[in-house]
Image: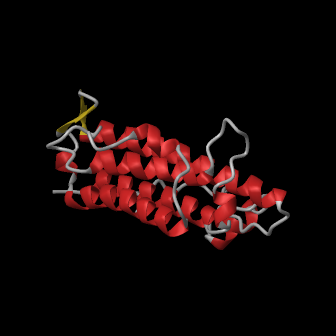
C-alpha cells in the first residue's frame, strides 16, 4: 500500500499553501481586501474561493458529488468577511479538508471514482485538477501581494529564489548545475 503519488500531491498542495500563506502574511487586512482593478478579485476573495472550492470538492469525495448543494460559489466572490480571523478560519478549513482526504488515501485509491458536477473522475484526475486550480489561485495571491507591497514601498520577503540569486541558492544546496547527473533516484 504505497503512497508515492499521494505523497507527491500532499507535498505540492503544502508547497502552494505555504507560498500563499507567506505572501498574505506580509500584508495587512486592508491590503488583503484591495483588488488591483475593479474587475479583479482581491486576495481575500481569492482565498475565500479557494477555501470554498477545496471544502466542497474534498468533503466526502467518494460518497457525494464534489459540487455540494450547500456551496454557493458565487458568494465566494463577494467580499463579505468581517475580519482576518474569519478569512483565516475559512482558509484553514478548506485546506484541512483536502489534507484529511489525502492523509486517508494510498496510491491504491488513485483509480477510485468520484463525481464532480455529475461527471466521473478518478481520484488521480480530481487531484490533478484540484492542484492545478489551487496553484493557479495561489500564484494570483503571491503576485497580487507583491504588487500591493510594491505600491506601498513596503519591504518584501522573497518567497522563492531571489532575482540574481540562483548561483548562491544552488551552492547553498550543494548543487552544481554543470556537474554530470548521478542518474539516481529522488529521495
Left/right of residue 138 with respect to residue 34 in the rendered view = left
Left/right of residue 49 with respect to residue 147 in the rendered view = left
Q: Can residue 184 be seen here?
A: no
Indicate the quadrant containing the C terminus: top left, top right, bottom left or bottom right: bottom left
Farthest-out residue, right: 153
Residue ID at (75%, 66%)? 156
Residue ID at (66%, 73%)? 172
Q: How is the image coloured?
A: secondary structure
Q: Can residue 108 be seen here?
A: yes
Q: Position of residue 80 (x, y in %)?
A: 52, 52
In this orientation, which residue lies closer to the viewer: 168 or 21?
Answer: 21
Residue 74 vertical placement versus 158 (above, below) = above
**Hey, which quadrant is residue 40 in on the image?**
top right
Residue 131 vertical placement versus 4 (above, below) = above
Q: Position of residue 137 (x, y in %)?
A: 54, 46
Q: Position of residue 164 (x, y in %)?
A: 80, 59
**Hey, which quadrant is residue 20 in on the image?**
bottom right
Farthest-out residue, bottom: 172
Indicate the quadrant containing the N terminus: top left, top right, bottom left or bottom right: bottom left
For the image, the number of numbered tags is 0
Residue ID at (51%, 56%)? 16
Left/right of residue 17 with respect to residue 157 in the rendered view = left
Q: Position of residue 184 (x, y in %)?
A: 43, 57
Residue ID at (27%, 61%)? 100
In this orientation, which residue lies closer to the viewer: 29 or 178?
Answer: 29
Amino acid at each position: 500500500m504505497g503512497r508515492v503519488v499521494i505523497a507527491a500531491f500532499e507535498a505540492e498542495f503544502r508547497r502552494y499553501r505555504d507560498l500563499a500563506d507567506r505572501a498574505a502574511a506580509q500584508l495587512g487586512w486592508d491590503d488583503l481586501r484591495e483588488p488591483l482593478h475593479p474587475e479583479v478579485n482581491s486576495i481575500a476573495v481569492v482565498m475565500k474561493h479557494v477555501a470554498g472550492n477545496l471544502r466542497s470538492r474534498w468533503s466526502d469525495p467518494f460518497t457525494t458529488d464534489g459540487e455540494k448543494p450547500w456551496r454557493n460559489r458565487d458568494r465566494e466572490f463577494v467580499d463579505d468577511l468581517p475580519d482576518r480571523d474569519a478569512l483565516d478560519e475559512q482558509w484553514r478549513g478548506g485546506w484541512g479538508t483536502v489534507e484529511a482526504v489525502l492523509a486517508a488515501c494510498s496510491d491504491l485509491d488513485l483509480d477510485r471514482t468520484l463525481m464532480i458536477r455529475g461527471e466521473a473522475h478518478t481520484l488521480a484526475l480530481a487531484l490533478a485538477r484540484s492542484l492545478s486550480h489551487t496553484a493557479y489561485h495561489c500564484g494570483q495571491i503571491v503576485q497580487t501581494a507583491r504588487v500591493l507591497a510594491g505600491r506601498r514601498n513596503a519591504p518584501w520577503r522573497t518567497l522563492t529564489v531571489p532575482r540574481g540569486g540562483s548561483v548562491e541558492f544552488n551552492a547553498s544546496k550543494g548543487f552544481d548545475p554543470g556537474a554530470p547527473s548521478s542518474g539516481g533516484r529522488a529521495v
